[in-house]
Image: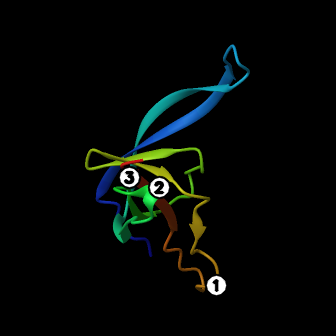
Amino acid sequence: MTFPTPFTVQRIRRTRNGEDALGQPTYAESTESVRVHGWQPTSQEERYVAEFTGRTVSDLKLLSPTDDFKSSDAVIIDGIKYEVDGEPLNHNTGWHGFKPGFTVQLRRVDGA
């Protein structure tokens, strides 16, 4: 049994392609449409510490049939860009052959 993938998101893959004049890494970006099960918000928090005043951190869980997301990727959902936060979580073990997929943690910081 598999879950349907009725939604499409845009995955931005960043690949290191060299260094700038100061020795800092430079990256090329490519965008690909990826079919997913869906997503859900996990938290939204406004920071009240003086140095973070006005900063809002929003976290989402992206539910995907594959683990084809890297911690250096970004994802665009409904026109909003989120950064992948860590590696995908595998939910395909211990289910007697049932493979529900992966959870990809996403984060967006506004007002940074």
Q: Amino acid at mark 1?
A: Gly
Q: Residue 95 sits in which quadrant? A: bottom right
Answer above or below: position of 30 versus 3. above
Q: Is residue 51 left or right of residue 67?
A: left
| Gap between marks 1 and 2 measured at Cα | 44 Å
The tag on residue 35 is 3
- The answer to whether residue 63 is left or right of residue 38 is right
Dot 2: within a 10 Å radius of its alpha carbon, few (fewer than 14), some, or many (20 or more) residues? few
The reply to whether residue 107 is in sight is no
Front-most of 2 and 52? 52
What residue appears at the point 34 percent right and 69 percent down from the top-left corner? Answer: 40
- Could you say which disc has been placed on residue 94 in the image? 1
Q: Are discs 2 and 3 less than 8 Å apart at CB? A: no
Quarter holding residue 79 = top left
Residue 66: which disc? none
Q: Nearer the viewer, mark 1 or mark 2?
A: 2
Question: Residue 87, percent across and down?
Answer: 62, 59
Query: Residue at position x 60%, y 86% from top?
Result: 96
Identify the mark nearer the N-term, 1 or 2: 2
Residue under label 2, please give it: 51
- Vertical placement of 24 versus 10: above or below? above
Element type where label 2 sits in the image: helix
Q: Is residue 79 left or right of residue 91?
A: left
- Give, as a three-letter code, the residue at label 2: Glu
